[in-house]
């Protein structure tokens, strides 16, 4: 059972303890500081701009989602950007709130159907509140080599045995499979 009370079927990343320690230190260092009163979609738009600034933009491949369940928690809802909006151009008004059938319940536009897998993650892992999926140029270039990644440096040891290799692309994940 995780610190969030959810049982996970996913093996824990050994770097997680380090990450949680960094989060706790950051919280201690910023205790008492005024926190910006940003809405969820304002935070998401900021994240999109940061990702674009780091080279993750200029394509339609990339989604930022945050779960926003209904009041009694019986259904998973999420915010995601409207389809076709590049990361470097996203504004808070570009996000749509969708239900578990990918139907827009708030906002204008329609979601990228590939965000369906985010809903599956949210259903299985109630402790996960946001997900980001991009196709960075570096990762895309490595994927095009067709070779599995090998650990070649101590800084990547946390990934040992945890990087999957998919020899053939099965297609866009629009369905429920």
Image (cartoon, rainbow, N blue to C red):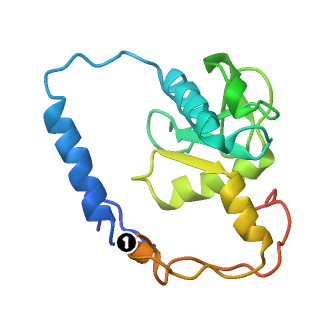
Q: Position of residue 22 (x, y in %)?
A: 24, 49
**Quarter where residue 176 is shown:** bottom right
Reply above or below: 38 against 157.
Answer: above
Q: Position of residue 167 (x, y in %)?
A: 78, 82
Q: Quadrant of the C terminus?
A: bottom right
Does residue 20 appear to the left or right of 41 in the view shown?
left
Q: Quadrant of the N terminus?
A: bottom left
Does residue 125 appear to the left or right of 44 in the view shown?
left
Callout 1 secondary element: loop
Q: Position of residue 43 (x, y in %)?
A: 49, 26
Does residue 33 appear to the left or right of 45 in the view shown?
left
Q: Position of residue 101 (x, y in %)?
A: 72, 45
Task: Name the foreground residue: 171 vs 135.
Answer: 135
Q: How many marks?
A: 1
Look at 55% across and 44% down and name the residue there.
75
Q: Dot 1 corresponds to which residue?
A: 12
Callout 1 crowding tier (Cα within 10 Å): few <14, some 14–19, many ≥20: few
Q: Is residue 166 visible to the viewer in this orientation of the structure? A: yes
Task: Name the foreground residue: 91 vs 22.
Answer: 22
Q: Residue furthest front?
A: 153
Reply above or below: 72 against 144.
Answer: above
């Amino acid at each position: 059972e995780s610190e969030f009370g959810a049982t996970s079927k996913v093996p824990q990343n050994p770097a997680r303890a380090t990450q949680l320690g960094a989060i706790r230190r950051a919280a201690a260092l910023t205790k008492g500081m005024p926190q910006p009163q940003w809405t969820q979609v304002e935070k998401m738009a900021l994240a999109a701009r940061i990702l674009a600034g780091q080279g993750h933009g200029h394509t339609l491949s990339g989604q930022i989602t945050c779960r926003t369940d209904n009041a009694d928690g019986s259904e998973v809802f999420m915010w995601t950007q409207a389809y076709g909006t590049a990361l470097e151009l996203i504004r808070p008004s570009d996000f749509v709130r969708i239900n578990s059938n990918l139907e827009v319940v708030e906002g204008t536009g329609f979601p990228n159907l590939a965000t369906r897998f985010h809903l599956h993650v949210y259903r299985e892992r109630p402790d996960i509140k946001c997900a980001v999926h991009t196709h960075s140029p570096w990762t895309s270039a490595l994927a095009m080599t067709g070779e599995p990644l090998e650990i070649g440096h101590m800084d990547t040891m946390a990934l040992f045995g945890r990087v999957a290799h998919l020899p053939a692309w099965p297609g866009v994940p629009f369905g429920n499979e």
